[in-house]
Image: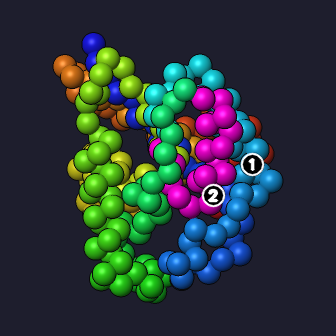
Amino acid sequence: MAKRTLYLLRHGQEERSYRIDNPDDLQQGPLTEIGRSQATQAAKRFTNIPLTHIHVSTMLRAKQTATPIIRAHPHAYCEEIDLIREVVPSVPARYADHFSYVTNELAAQFDERITDTYARFFRAASREEEHILLVCHGNLIRALIGRHLGAGQDAWIRMSLNNASLTTFEFGVDTPDALITFNDTCHLTADLKTYL
């Protein structure tokens, strides 16, 4: 039976020396030492999973998180794509000052990327079995979860995802789509569990 397992891995902890209010600066921030350890542990988590595809955000922190996973899966199809870069899914009124840099034009771009990511990856398998990994960002993952569960537009802000956490979905042909794990960090030791 055809089944698609979709793994959404948030990047490891990054250095936060960049300006959060500058969208052009969001790709900055290499992984910290903790972030590199998180990436190594995430790669070990996928040791016995036959990944068929690895899609990686073009942002530095995601690329660095994906590196050990890609090394461990030389036969998987790999690509870096802008589609799964960080987004701000919506700007709830109480956070308007924090997200003041999100113009209407930028909000429309973010929404288009979320919609396109959902359409591309949240569907049944096209072959016997697929194990697809997206190495991307917390806001995007939370937006995709909210969309899949039919939650409101601002639901993302009420979810918390740790660095290098794993969220998993399964899509079958004859079975309902299912959220299997959310913010799973069982591959991380207590000292490696971080949010920022």
Q: Amino acid at mark 2?
A: Arg
Residue 171 seen in the current view: yes
**Classed neighbour count for the residue bearing mark 1: other residues with Cα under 10 Å, few (<14), some (14–19), many (≥20):** many
Q: How many marks?
A: 2
Quarter of image, res 115: bottom left
**Residue 1 within the segment the image draws in magenta:** no
Q: Amino acid at mark 1?
A: Arg
Mark 2 = which residue? 61
Frontmost residue, 188 versus 109: 109
Frontmost residue, 151 versus 148: 148
Which residue is rendered at x = 32% and y = 17% of the image? 128
Q: Position of residue 20 (x, y in %)?
A: 57, 78
- The magenta segment is 55-74
Which residue is rendered at x = 32% and y = 58% of the image? 114
Residue 93 seen in the current view: no
Frontmost residue, 68 versus 13: 68
Mark 1 = which residue? 36
> In this view, which residue lies farthest toward the top?
1
**Classed neighbour count for the residue bearing mark 2: other residues with Cα under 10 Å, few (<14), some (14–19), many (≥20):** many
- Please identify the quadrant where the C terminus is shown: bottom right
Q: Position of residue 176 (x, y in %)?
A: 23, 27
Label 2 or label 1, whichever comes before in sequence order: 1
Q: Regarding mark 1 in the picture, which secondary structure is present there?
A: helix
Q: Main secondary structure of the magenta part?
A: helix
Q: Marks 2 and 1, Cα distance to the nearest angstrom? A: 10 Å
Q: Which mark is residue 23?
A: none
**Residue 58 within the segment the image draws in magenta:** yes
Q: Position of residue 154 (x, y in %)?
A: 32, 65
Q: Position of residue 111 (x, y in %)?
A: 29, 66
Q: Regarding mark 2 in the picture, which secondary structure is present there?
A: helix
Q: Is residue 174 left or right of residue 163?
A: left
Quarter of image, res 89: bottom left
